[in-house]
Image (cartoon, rainbow, N blue to C red):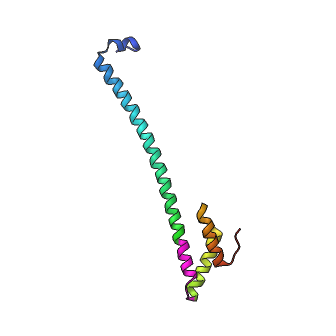
Amino acid sequence: MTAGTEGLAAWPPAAVATVVAAVVTTGLTLVVAVVGGVWVVVRWRRDVAREERDRAWSRLVWIVDQACDPDVGRSEVGLVGADAMYDMQMLRDDDAVLGTMVLGLITGQEQR
């Protein structure tokens, strides 16, 4: 085979069409792979953020349940947990406002 455009002119049209189709298919496959990879990463990050938020809220609910329990031992565990969670700032964004307010009411601490 010869290099350059004069070599392509010697190829049969079906061979040129096959090579062009293969190059275009490869390019489209790479584009789809990149878009798919970005979509997977975005979805994964969203799922992780949702799981972290759910976990933080379940911990907050558990702490509130313990702190409001009539049993003195459970109530003390809840108060210690509320104090620790208040300092940890586990809740993010809009959740932090309500969570900090509830934890502040339980622990008696002012909002910072």
Does residue 56 lie above or below 37 as drawn?
A: below
Image location (x, y in percent) of residue 40: 44, 49
Q: Specify whether 66 is left or right of 37.
A: right
Residue 8, above or below 18: above
Say whether residue 96 is left or right of residue 28: right
Instruction: Check residue 70 for magenta coloring.
Output: yes
Q: Quadrant of the N terminus?
A: top left
Picture quarter containing residue 12? Answer: top left
Seen from the viewer's position, the closer of residues 83 and 50 is 50
Q: Is residue 24 left or right of residue 53?
A: left
**Tag count:** 0
Please tell me which residue is depicted at 54% across the width and 79% down the height of the picture.
65
**Magenta segment main secondary structure:** helix
Residue 92 in view, yes or no: no
Q: Position of residue 25 (x, y in %)?
A: 36, 31
For this orientation, the residue located farthest to the bottom is 71
**Observer able to see residue 87:** yes
Where is residue 89 drawn, in percent x and y? 63, 66
In which quadrant of the rendered image does the C terminus lie?
bottom right
Q: Residue at x 56, y 88 (%)?
A: 70
The residue sitting at 62% across, 74% down in the picture is 103
Camera-nearest residue between 55 and 98: 98
> Which sits in the foreground, 22 or 1?
22
User: Magenta stretch?
Assistant: 59-71
19 lies left or right of 52: left
Q: Quadrant of residue 98?
A: bottom right
- Residue 44 lies, in percent from the top left, at 47, 53
